[in-house]
Amino acid sequence: MSTGIDTEAATAIPQRLLLGSGPSPVPPRVLAALAQPTIGHMDPAFAAVMGETIALLREAFQTENLATLPISGTGSAGMEALVANFVDPGDRIVCGVNGLFGVRIADELQRAGADVVQVRADWGRAIATEQLLEAAAGGRTDAIFVVHGETSTGVAQPLGGLADWCREHDALLLLDCVTSLGGHPLRLDEDGVDAAFSGTQKCLNCPPGLAPFTAGERALDKLRRRDRPGRSWYFDLSLVLDYWSPGPTSGRTYHHTAPINMVYALREALRIAVGEEWLATSWERHRRAHHALRDALAVFGCERLAPDGEQLHPLLAVTPPAGVDEAAVRRGLLVDHGIEISGGLGPLTGRLWRIGVMGAGAKREPQEQLVAALATLLHADPSEPLAALHEGWRA
Amino acid sequence: MSTGIDTEAATAIPQRLLLGSGPSPVPPRVLAALAQPTIGHMDPAFAAVMGETIALLREAFQTENLATLPISGTGSAGMEALVANFVDPGDRIVCGVNGLFGVRIADELQRAGADVVQVRADWGRAIATEQLLEAAAGGRTDAIFVVHGETSTGVAQPLGGLADWCREHDALLLLDCVTSLGGHPLRLDEDGVDAAFSGTQKCLNCPPGLAPFTAGERALDKLRRRDRPGRSWYFDLSLVLDYWSPGPTSGRTYHHTAPINMVYALREALRIAVGEEWLATSWERHRRAHHALRDALAVFGCERLAPDGEQLHPLLAVTPPAGVDEAAVRRGLLVDHGIEISGGLGPLTGRLWRIGVMGAGAKREPQEQLVAALATLLHADPSEPLAALHEGWRA
């Protein structure tokens, strides 16, 4: 019986090697976990899954925060949740802006009615801590918000010194760690971060759809002091926490329906990322993979945007070789070789390749595939860049 | 190598027959679609998947709205998106409240700064159209917001007469159709609904994690007239639409990263729900399944909360038999028989069973399993209720 819709026209899903800015390669084990039978979100078995996921997330964040959970949306929903809970209208927020994701946070803060003090650096550079603190000292500052891993440029923001200032001045330190979580050194509690959000589709190698999120007592205290409900019901932590992490004596209270199968997948991805490999070992592997690939691409004439010491290991942003049609090469990688890498964003459109070095993508074999395919498309001899790659992995 | 986390402790996922208030039974085909390889969200193949999903969603909503898409969050995110886009601070909104989901919408509207005029009916009853219109006529009303299918009570709200008034008075008709979409008669365009949201885990038999959403020109016109960005970046349709449904000449613009695998699953679920069965045939099947199960449960002494003519076919809410420990029976169904049904919410806690009659759950075989298991737990002879069920399916 025909209903007028051509259901035969369902486009087939191709197999890709995902070495772009995310999503990253999802292991078969995680896809299998995703496809486990859906059960009820108030089922005791699902409560156990939630608890196990939270424990693994705390390890990934290196935090003991009780308020640690995956927000039911993608990474950007984590940003919105963070602002909805910890930024009030009229708050003075110092916001680091050195790439697209800083621009986005500033936009979100403005929508929330905050007085946003933007501290800018060139796209491709970290922001000097002194500049952030100078801006913070320019008024009664409620929070400093920075992007730990700028996905648009491959820059890692140093956090040293920010937490001390915030503690001395009753301000919060808020963090976007979408691309750094699990792949770049980050210890939430040690770094003194008060609240942070991330995404699942970067170094955790899980499909997109959840936003790992954590908040400490200083942040929650601010939330508790609110005299009226925040602007968002969906992201209101005071409700969400009773659903995800009820107290020892209270039962779970229905809020929304969690994305059940996505939680299965995140639990499995975290078991791989932080349950089976030491986090510090993984960070070192990401560092090594970053430098090996950088050395290999340098043979083609690609230069890294971030200077030494400011690079984000999970995202290698390089200039394409001079004279090359960068979009055509990316298209060739995707169509002829099934490999995805990403281009530049905003002012860097057409001037950048952004290559993911994330989790299962931060290994020698996928990088070999990429280098060999690039050599073919650039009509270059693959032996020298492959030798550089191998040398980097031996180092 | 041990990392201090007991990864062996991962709780196994049991197999359940989901006949509660949602999630509903997810067919193996949909789970298989979910587990297809993750690809990039800017991959041309994913753009094709998005387009096919949108076409199927339009069919499910019975709308030609260009702005039809799944919001990247669960059903409640759809509510938040609807309010974030179409309700401005100070707007006067008439809101029907006859169950938990109406209460929730009123809360969300208040958070958005609206002047909320609540029109209440008893939990378990529909709201009289005249009452809604009388309240709307009490001031310059910007929108009427009602819940088409109240999941907390199993009541369907009649929509007749609302759209005409809204068109005459420059107001919007906004709708929650989380539990009705695909299972209870609803024709968005014919009913004159200006914007609506739904969930995937009810009659569409897809795991939770996306919110089907649609908005017509009258609603979009209001959005376009805004002189400043709305309170939400994540749900801002003026940005999301450039990502999901770019114009014929413009390319897709990156906004957030869609929950890629969830979109695969929704596409497959929609192919089953509206691609392979006529929607009207499915509505009739839900109606028949509702009445058959109601007749069967009546033999146990269960009475339906909603009176005739106000019942929501996909959700049968009944009183448990007198003298029965309703929570113990539900626990027995889950633990001994692997069958989930839901209890009452709010003032109806302990006084209601809510049974899903949704998609693959609106069939004879799962209902037979439920009735037989209930008979066992209630120490009743199953033959009479099963005969009533079969008679209902023959009718």
Image (spheres, coloured by chain):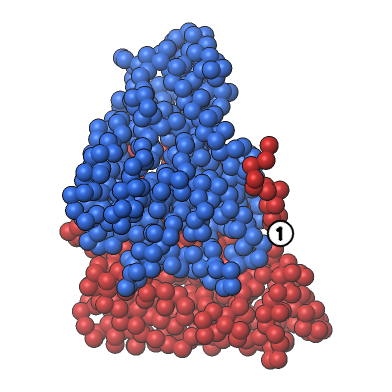
Chain colours: A red, B blue
Expressed as whole percent of the image width and height from the top left, the position of residue B277 reads 61, 37
Q: Is residue A199 above or below residue B148?
A: below
Asked if residue A68 lies left or right of residue B252, the reply is left
Q: Amino acid at mark 1?
A: Pro
Q: Nearer the viewer, residue B210 or B164?
A: B164
**Which residue: 40% across, 21% down?**
B329
Residue A312 appears in the figure: yes
Asked if residue A389 lies left or right of residue A61, the reply is right
Q: Is residue A36 above or below residue A168?
A: above
**Which residue: 35% across, 37% down?**
B157
Q: Is residue B71 above or below residue B231?
A: above
Expressed as whole percent of the image width and height from the top left, the position of residue A23 reads 58, 64
Expressed as whole percent of the image width and height from the top left, the position of residue B8 reads 55, 45
Asked if residue B92 lies left or right of residue A267, the reply is left
**Which residue: 36% across, 24% down?**
B308
Q: What subunit carries mark 1?
A: A
Residue A215 appears in the figure: no
SS at badge 1: loop
Report the number of numbered marks. 1
Expressed as whole percent of the image width and height from the top left, the position of residue B295 reads 45, 17
Q: Give the image quarter of residue B153.
A: top left
Q: Quadrant of the N terminus of chain B?
A: bottom right
**Which residue: 54% across, 88% down?**
A307
Q: Give the image quarter of residue B366.
A: top right
Q: Which residue is mark 1?
A: A14
